[in-house]
Amino acid sequence: MKHYRILILSGLLAATALLGACSKWLDVSPKTQMKEDEQFSNRQGFIDALFGVYQRTAADSLYGNNLSFGMIDILAGRYENKAGTGNWYGQLARYNYTFNASGLNVERETSEVWATAYAAIAQANFILRNVDDKKSMLGEQTYRIVKGESLALRAFLHFDLLRLYAPVPGAANNGQPAIPYMDAFTIQPRARQTVGEIVSRCEQELLAAEELLSVHTEIDQIAGNQNSVNPDLFLMFRQNHLNYWAVKALLARLYLYKSDKVNAFKYAQEVINSGKFRLMTSADLASTDPVSENSDLTLTREHVFSIYASQLKRVADDLFKQSPNTNNEDTRDLYNTQTKINTLYESSVPGYSTDIRLPIQAKSLWTVVNSLGNVYTKKYHADNQRNVRQRLIPVIRLPEMYYISAEAALTPEEGLVFLNAVRTARSLPELATAANLEAEIMKEYRKEFYAEGQLWYYFKRKNTTTIPDGVGNPMTATKYIFPLPLDEIQFGK
């Protein structure tokens, strides 16, 4: 790798993104020290570089598509257009990760996840290489936020790479080779570390980020007020940063991954009890409409961390809207059938037809193509250019903290309380018994995170052998592991 490209954005992040502000690129190579000194000569240079990392994560190959509603939800059996093997989706849904024939290149897509994630990590490392030397220039608060978010981003990206490219979690696989942990801005290859070593590194860096970010714990609730009143632009839109509470949520997610239920419960509860986020109800959906300036299709008051994707309309129009003047779905569309959606939400079970996530209850969240019986989610429709909420892709939402609490609670009965809290918010009756708690948690992951990319990680963590609606069953150890890219040598083996 001869050089890294550092994406620079205007310091206004979401505010200027709404106005279509242009971004610029800065090429940084080991020989261009002057450019590096210039980049970090003032506070705004650090802010721009940090926002550049977030923008990189919004790429189609990461959370702007593949690791949210796209590739990773295809793996989880979310969508219907996977019956045949003559398209990219069909090959991916069968876990043919190295398939490359007849114009269908699954291998390229999985490799781009790796490459883009490590490019973003390199940008975070670029910041971390310089931030300590400029602490006095930045001031205590800015220094701690910039360093804390950069550490958190590095850990966050490594953890998701681990969850994709490593074996199913568990003590038996802790010693297995996984991925390189890139903790320095360098072009030198790094050897892969074991699963256990990567988890430990992520944990250490998230704990360090938690301490650093404790300097600013406020959330300005972009969900409730699109015009943040914070006088410092850097402190606006905290839900679109890896903020203090998002780091705690990531720690809850990581501790559950490593089967440390005590700490998973502790951190999930801290997020729930923070008072910074709340579960949304049917009343919040009453006026939801994709063309409205006030619509809130992804329930942003529940966002603990979300990605701002300025190009979301382009992607959503391509994937989640029926192609005009056609009687059949375009091969790129991501849709399901009305029958399977009704089955997913158990609409025939007495009392369950009131679920606010059902098309019949949340018509503004779904498009039903009656002539074909197919259903598209409207979560990512971005038809109002003034509505910033329509360009947010959730990465961590509050319900996950309730599900982690339910799974990690000391007793099933205690866990049931947290599961019922989400069910109540979704207008479902409370479960009276915890006898089938684990099965009910899985149902909720399937219902709640449609087109959000979390279900695949749940299936993998549980080592699920049969994925509902999957065409690649039964699952095996290799089907849960992305293969290393052919050019992985640039990062080490």
Image (cartoon, rainbow, N blue to C red):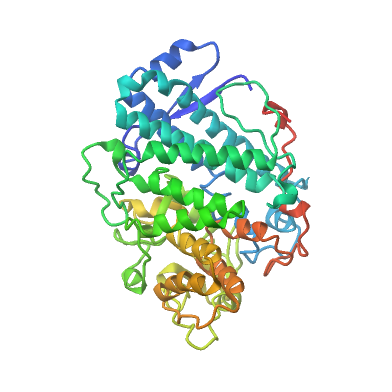
| Residue 459 visible in image | yes
Q: Position of residue 387 (x, y in %)?
A: 32, 53
* Quadrant hosting residue 55: top left
As displayed, is residue 9 above or below residue 384?
Answer: above
Q: From the viewer's perspective, is residue 348 above or below residue 462?
A: below
Left or right relative to 85: residue 26: left
* Residue 486 in picture, x, y percent from top left: 75, 34
Count of numbered marks? 0
Counting from the top left corner in percent of width and height, residue 86 is at 75, 57
Q: Residue at x 53, y 53 (%)?
A: 253
The residue that appears at 77% across and 54% down in the rendered structure is 477
**Which image quarter holds the C terminus?**
top right
Where's the N terminus, which quadrant? Answer: top right
Q: Report which quarter residue 492 is drawn in.
A: top right
Q: Residue at x 50, y 83 (%)?
A: 432
Q: Position of residue 274 (x, y in %)?
A: 34, 56
Q: Nearer the viewer, residue 484 or 254?
A: 254
Position of 136 relative to 76 (above/below): above
In this picture, residue 439 sits left or right of residue 413: right
Report the front residue among 61 and 235: 235
Q: Nearer the viewer, residue 154 or 169?
A: 169
Camera sees residue 55:
no
